[in-house]
Image (cartoon, grey):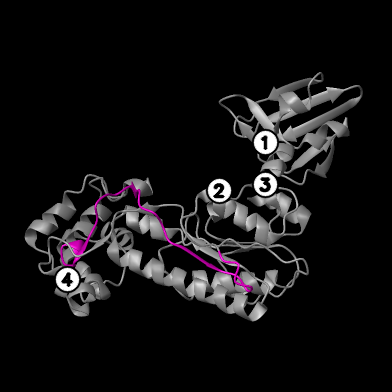
Amino acid sequence: MAYQNLDVMFGGGNGILTDDIRQHFNQNGTTLFSNDRNALLNYEGEGKVWALFGDGAMTYDLDRNPEKAPSLAEMTDKALQLLSKKENGFFLMVEGSHVDWAAHANDAAAVIHEFLAFDEAVGKVMDFAQNDGNTAVVILSDHATGGLSIGSRNCSGSSSLSLEDLFGAVSNYKISASGLESILVNTKPDEIKSVFKEYTDVEITDEEMQTLLSSKNYKEGDYTQVGTSENLAHNIVKILNARTCFGFTTGSHTGEEVLLASYHPQGDILKGNVTNRGVNEYLQKVAGLEISLQDLSDSIFAKHQDVFAGMNYSIDKQDPDFPVLKVKKGRNTLEIKAFSSVAKLNGKSFDLGSVIVYIDKNDTFYLPVHLKEKL
């Protein structure tokens, strides 16, 4: 993502930045904000800007400190402000990624809050699109997760449940299960019951207390396994969900069709039962692309064996994470680093216009066809 030369990128991930990425930002004029919400929201510049919060992923919206980290809606609004200055238009992708994480964890409260946070961001987009009069919007997900049900074996007569029956308990949960986990791991056992009550209004039983203390591991590293392994967050979720009328069928993905909603200023909306390829074709059409994505892919991501056929080339794997393709022809030497958009010709750097992809399984670089013209 860093080498795609994006105009805006807001989210988590300070800990993923490398010195090479920081150097690239300095060279292409990208402004980088780290853990500085005010700097991002007050930014009015013209150049490329990244704003990252936290070392890895941002927290759930339910756990977010609004003074330190922006909401998804705030980041969306700022991105729209900056991108709308561009005369040729823009493409913006906004992801409510933690809806999936919360559903993997079977955390009903976190799921609800993440949907509300995403809905608020959609509101910012729709306000902009309707005022702009030249913007299309597509809202969809890549899959469903968790199998959330309204009504469960804990609640009888689900068809006649009141709003209080459905949402009374979950509305009192002030923190996500993973957020509570991070607090309980540093809490003395004799204080766990009171802390649990403080954040959830739930008085846990002695048996539930023992379940928490017997958790096999206090932190599940793989977010897709939180809902199924006997970690502390999973056991917290079981206790919380037992007080609600929400149920989950799995901690993994589910196969149902997903939401598709769209808006177009002239009414040319995307609707019906649409495949992922159909969504892509629609986006190409409304963006006015004259060359199809498939044709672009064929020209930008060709195999290096085909691009440099008949030439002398080798792959330097001194750094196994970022191998370098070296091509020689006459007195010229071309060096192409994997996962970068910058190459070197006879030691002089130049921009490729696209990120280079390297696949270790077939030891192949995928790169622009026009690179052979450099030699």
Q: Residue furthest left?
A: 206
Residue at (81% x, 18% y) in the render: 310
* N-term mark: 1 or 2: 2
Return the residue at label 3.
293
Return the residue at label 2.
277
Residue at (64% x, 77% y) in the render: 42
| Res. 253 in view | yes
| Res. 69 in view | no
Considering the numbered disc 1 on the image, is that residue within a helix, a strand or a loop? Answer: loop
Left or right, residue 133 beside residue 139 = right
Left or right, residue 284 beside residue 58 = right
Instruction: Let me know if residue 47 is in the magenta part.
Output: no
Q: Residue 9 occupies which quadrant of the picture?
A: bottom right
Query: Within 10 Å of the Cα at label 4, are there few (<14), some (14-19), or many (20+) other Cα atoms?
Result: few
* N-term mark: 3 or 1: 3
What is the distance, in whole Å, between disc 2 and disc 4 at their CAs? 38 Å
Residue at (25% x, 53% y) in the render: 234
Q: Which is the main secondary structure of the residues drawn in magenta?
A: loop
What is the distance, in whole Å, between disc 1 and disc 4 at their CAs? 56 Å
Type of residue at label 4? Ser
* N-term mark: 2 or 4: 4
Whether the residues at callouts 3 and 1 have beta carbons within 8 Å, the answer is no
Considering the numbered disc 3 on the image, is that residue within a helix, a strand or a loop? Answer: helix
Nearer to us: label 1 or label 4: 4
Return the residue at label 1.
338
Type of residue at label 2? Arg
What is the distance, in whole Å, between disc 1 and disc 2 at their CAs? 28 Å
In the rendered image, residue 315, in percent from the top left (x then y), is placed at 70, 24
Nearer to us: label 3 or label 1: 3
Whether the residues at callouts 1 and 4 have beta carbons within 8 Å, the answer is no
Left or right, residue 168 beside residue 67 = left
